[in-house]
Image (spheres, helix red, strand yellow):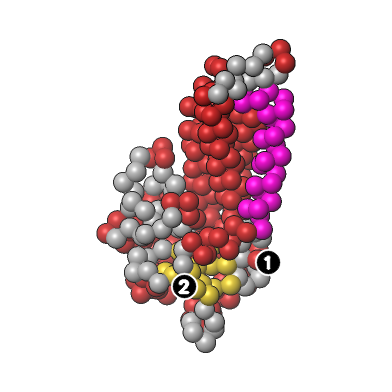
């Protein structure tokens, strides 16, 4: 199964789960409310998620005069990927990492930490930048933003269900389309957990695809593979102090250096990513 098909199935599952949660909470009217809320939150995510991500990461935009080599690499790789050159940001952090954001290729940005530029060779840094441009080319940022918003909205519905149960709001008549007690309990417990698992599965699937796209853009899969190995070690030694909501955007997990359970990991195992890259024929 290709990564795009898998992502489509997961997104459909997340959307279906959201609508079912709304129906469990308030019947047909609850499903309608859930749909309207999802549309509103996704509109916000589409227009403002990039600004929020950059601000939360304390990223600073740099000019060509400030970082000429970095700009040159981004420009060269963007040309190879047939993309507009994204804005370039630097995060003042010794831990090596990077991410891309933006609602589409015309409004994209690439951010790298100062530690990344100090640790990697030029070829390895180009591999990381190519991976991030792969996300831009595949429009992964938009997909991940929508998935995050949907998962957050499902958790919000679960919280609403808790309050509704406290005040008897889920004791409605099923014949009138109201949610019942059992459906409400199931939605409160299962839906947020399932939404999180689906969201993380989407994130992991997009990382594999971005690795493949990045390898094609820079034409050196081994450079990206070497960079991933160094980044994993760097983030194990010194996890970044980032908002957990932004963790899935980074090229490697910035929080716990791979110590979280695989089911709830925001990224695929580095070893598997490296093996897939090394299996690519130049």
Counting from the top left corner in percent of width and height, residue 231 is at: 36, 61
Q: Residue at x 60, y 70 (%)?
A: 86
Residue found at the far bottom of this picture = 65
How many neighbours does mark 2 have within 10 angstroms: few (below 14), some (14-19), or many (20 or more)?
many
How many neighbours does mark 1 have within 10 angstroms: few (below 14), some (14-19), or many (20 or more)?
few
Counting from the top left corner in percent of width and height, residue 64 is at: 54, 83
Residue located beneath label 2 in the image: 90
Of residue 159 and residue 112, the one placed in the foreground of this image is: 159
Residue located beneath label 1 in the image: 106
Would you say 88 lies left or right of 223 here?
right
Residue 142 painted magenta: no
Q: Is residue 98 above or below residue 199?
A: below
Labels 2 and 1 touching (C-beta < 8 A): no
Start and end of the magenta stretch?
Answer: 24-47
User: What's the CA distance linking mark 2 and mark 1?
Assistant: 20 Å
Counting from the top left corner in percent of width and height, residue 149 is at: 59, 45
* Number of numbered callouts drawn: 2
């Amino acid at each position: 199964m290709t990564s795009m098909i898998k992502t489509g199935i997961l997104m459909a599952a997340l959307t279906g789960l959201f609508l079912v949660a709304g129906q469990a909470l308030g019947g047909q009217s609850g499903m309608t409310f859930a749909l309207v809320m999802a549309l509103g939150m996704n509109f916000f995510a589409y227009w403002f998620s990039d600004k929020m991500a950059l601000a939360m990461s304390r990223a600073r935009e740099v000019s060509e005069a400030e970082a000429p080599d970095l700009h040159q690499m981004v420009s060269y790789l963007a040309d190879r990927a047939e993309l507009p050159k994204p804005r370039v940001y630097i995060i003042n952090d010794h831990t090596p990492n990077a991410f891309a954001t933006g609602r589409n290729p015309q409004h994209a940005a690439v951010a790298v930490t100062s530690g990344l530029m100090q640790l990697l060779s030029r070829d390895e840094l180009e591999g990381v930048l190519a991976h991030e441009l792969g996300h831009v080319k595949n429009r992964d940022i938009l997909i991940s933003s929508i998935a995050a918003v949907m998962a957050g909205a499902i958790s919000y519905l679960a919280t609403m269900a808790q309050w509704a149960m406290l005040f008897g709001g889920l004791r409605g008549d099923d014949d009138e389309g109201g949610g019942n007690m059992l459906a409400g309990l199931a939605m409160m417990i299962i839906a947020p957990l399932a939404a999180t698992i689906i969201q993380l599965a989407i994130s992991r699937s997009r990382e594999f695809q971005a690795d493949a796209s990045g390898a094609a853009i820079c034409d050196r899969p081994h450079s990206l593979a070497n960079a991933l190995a160094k980044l994993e070690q760097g983030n194990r030694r010194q996890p970044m102090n980032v908002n957990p909501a932004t963790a899935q955007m980074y090229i490697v997990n910035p929080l716990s250096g791979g110590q979280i359970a695989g089911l709830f990991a925001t990224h695929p195992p580095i070893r598997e990513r490296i093996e897939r890259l090394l299996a690519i024929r130049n």
